[in-house]
Image (spheres, rainbow, N blue to C red):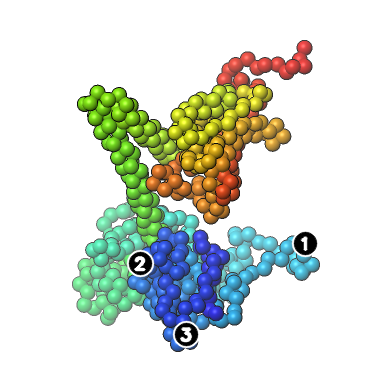
Amino acid sequence: MPSLFIIQGRNRGARYDLAAPSGAVSIGREAGNLVQLEDNEVSRRHAEIRRVGEAFIVGDLKSSNGTYLNEARVERAELSSGDRIRIGRTVLVYAKDGEDPAAFATVDIVPAASSADSSRIVRSMREDDSIVLAAPEDSQNRWLARARSNLQVMYRTSLAVSHTLDIDELLGRILQLVFEWVEADRGCIMLIDPESGELRTKARRDRKAGETGSMAISRTILDYVLDRREGVLTSDAQDDDRFSGGNSVVRTGVREAICVPMQGRYGTVGVIYVDTTMPLIQAVDQGQRRFSDDHLKLMIAIGHQAALAVEDTTYYSAMVQSERLAGVGQTIATLSHHIKNILQGIRGGSYLVEMGLENDDAGVLRKGWDIVRRNQDKISSLVMDMLSFSKDREPDPAPSDLKSLIDDIVETVRQRADEAQATIHWQPPADLPLLLFDPVGMSRAVLNVVTNALDAVEGRPHAAVTISAAVDQEARVARITVADNGAGMPPETLAEIFTLFVSTKGSRGTGLGLTVSRKILREHGGDIHASSRVGEGSTFVLEFPLEDRGAAEHANGLPTTPPMDSP
């Protein structure tokens, strides 16, 4: 049967059979779509593929970013085998009945040691050594020399527009390149304001430093370039029939000038304008005409390159802003929901406290206060996790006793374990040395993992959490292992547990704890590893690089303990 195969994007490798004899296969970000894509640039219901007779038709559903078939934007089009459909950042390949869509995207890289690889390198060359770009001064073929020179200009332009995402810097580089190639006295780049539709000067350059006075540009020439999307070369525009009705040409006294449109993929984004201040008669008398048709052709090409770069930069900025707003919205929604639940708990506990005070009932008072206290602990934990995650923090290592740190954590969660009817097994090793780590950060990381383990075993028969610590001298790491006998997690859930705001505890969890713990361990140069089996429980291993006792004591200015075999 016909099928789709995703070759690019977060869902890469997924395959979907288009088996429905009628109706449509919907594609989008929402869970209700038959093809659900994890792509922020995909609309909720982005596109559909519908069977019409023996053909399959792809149609856009008025999406924000459009649907592309073989890199051409389409509203509705018939699919052929091997066609590539781009939706957001995701690319899908369509294949007819009996064909493997994955074959259209397969490229084999032959290993270096393979007998099938008979290639050998015969010449290597850097960018600045390329003979195509280096136009020899003694070349007798003027046409070839001019072609090489033009290619060099376009190559440098492409490099300039690809190395920055700042529009102001980009336009400045473009003008600098133009002035290196064209003997213009003045130049500017004007972009069309998307709101007003008017041209706004974004970059200006003068060949002579200090001569940056007023620069008058003919509205007649600008309108001609924008309306017709054509570049113009003018030598005494006052006598040019194309501009005979333009009073602005007379007022500006234009002599020699080039004005080209910045034509991008979706429209004109602005113009590039350069001119001379030397009167045309004087230039002709001196045989110094500055501009030619070659200049105009190359300026048009430069304008196109610049327009594409402006569009890409604008699109990238809008995409970053959109992702930032989406991230802020998700953060606010998640935290607000969790804080609301905590406040409801505090409100319920406060009601019991008031009832106990009014009726002088110590039992009700104690019950209400326990509810308030537990929710205070939750809000405190949430705030600490938010602070830990929101800023990069260099660990403040100090010689610390890992046994004492875990002892304190076990004592902290003792009441929580009693409420969950869980047993905590913690047998500290006798030979655990003094280690160098940030005790505040490490305590937070371990506490989050232990608390999660207690949540996982709540309500389970013979609920237990086992904590162990060890030093691996061979691997030069310290390890803390936290294991539980909870319900465990399937592989797809296990793969997401360190993702921000992803929680296996539903409305009871924030999805911050494990993310913060991993961040703290990685700040120490370590990491967290998790394993789990459904029905058997989960195990988390926290490890960080090992520092010996001498280094730990030296870091804190303590006297170093001599080795046992020292005299």
The answer, for residue 24, to whether it is visible in the render is: yes
Tell which circle, 2 or 3, labels the residue nearer the N-terminal end: 3
Task: Bin the neighbour count of mark 1 within 10 Å (Cα to Cα): few under 14, some 14-19, many 20 and up.
Answer: few
Q: Mark 1 to mark 3: distance in Å?
A: 46 Å
Nearer the camera: disc 1 or disc 3: 3
Which residue does the numbered mark 3 point to in the structure image? 55
Which residue position is annotated with label 2?
A: 64
Residues tagged 2 and 1 counted as in contact (Cβ below 8 A)? no
Q: CA distance from mark 2 to mark 1?
A: 48 Å
Look at the picture and state if 22 lies above or below 257: below
Check disc 2 and report its element: helix, strand or loop: loop
In terms of image quadrants, where is residue 485?
A: top right
Q: Nearer the viewer, residue 16 or 93?
A: 16
Amino acid marked by disc 2: Ser
Question: Which x, y percent locates residue 164?
Answer: 45, 55
Residue at the spot 49% in from the left edge and 37% down from the top edge: 454
Quarter of the picture holding the N terminus: bottom right
Image depth: mark 2 or mark 3 in front:
3
The residue wearing badge 1 is 113
**Residue 240 pos. (x, y %):** 29, 78
User: Which amino acid, mark 1?
Assistant: Ala
Q: Nearer the viewer, residue 450 or 558?
A: 450
- Residue 245 at x, y = what percent? 21, 77
- Element assignment for label 3: strand
Q: Is residue 239 visible?
A: no
